[in-house]
Amino acid sequence: MSEKLGEDFFHRDALIVARELAGKIVVRKFENGEVSKIRITETEAYCGEEDKGCHASKGRTPRTELLYGRPGIIYVYLCYGMHWLMNVITGEDGHPEGVLLRAGENFNGPARLTKALGVDKRFNGLSICDNDEIWIEDDGKKFDIFTAPRVGIDYAGEEWKNKPWRFIIRT
DNA sequence: TTAGTGATATCC
DNA sequence: GATATCACTAAA
């Protein structure tokens, strides 16, 4: 009883989507026909220009342009020259918010996730509900979620870096 | 703890 | 054109 998540799911506040995305399944179909499913264990919400932790807070640029786009768009960001981090855009069209997929079962760390999924910049700009290589499913299982401050955004300042906008499932 | 890595933004 | 920065990982 797995259900593929559609655009409606992402067309909500990033905080809600991030919370509900924790515990869902990312499905990746490779070119050779192999399919891998990975449970999302950790997400983070990034909410708008006023959120200093969000890329869009520094202004609209070609890179952050995607954040302003339609919900369900995959935003792949290259960090430190070797790591791909994967986000999904949420909320209203024109409002820069999204959810970072921070970890999956069997690994820790956002770059491990994309590595395992074979995600790279080819996926940047794709809609996660409108392609046959990667999507997210709800298998109906429920998890206890706990929150924590986001990591890696010390530059955002006390006010923003302490927001409990990181969602982790209890396993 | 530190090196490695490359796209992006920002400063000439 | 150049350089400073960055939501990280792996190796030690």
Image: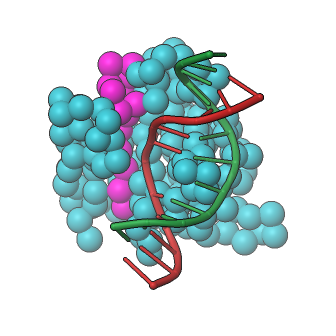
Chain colours: A cyan, B green, C red
Residue A53 in view: yes
Residue A118 in the image: above or below residue A127: below
Please tell me which residue lies in front, A154 or A162.
A154
Along the horizontal axis of the image, is A150 left or right of B5? Answer: left
Where's residue A116, x and y in %?
A: 59, 67
Q: Is residue A46 magenta?
A: yes
Count of labels in the image:
0
Where's residue B11, x and y in %?
A: 54, 18
Residue A77 in the image: above or below residue A47: below
Where's residue A117, x and y in %?
A: 61, 63
Residue displayed at 45% across by 50% down: A101
Residue displayed at 26% across by 71% down: A171
Along the horizontal axis of the image, is A101 left or right of A122? Answer: left
Where's residue A166, x and y in %?
A: 28, 47
Residue A163 in view: no
Residue displayed at 29% across by 41% down: A154
Along the horizontal axis of the image, is C3 left or right of C4? Answer: right
Q: Quadrant of residue A153?
A: top left
Residue A22 in the image: above or below residue A88: below
Residue displayed at 28% across by 45% down: A150
Q: Is residue A20 magenta?
A: no
Please tell me which residue lies in front, A138 or A119.
A119
Specify the segment rendered in magenta: A40-54
Q: Quadrant of residue A126?
A: top right
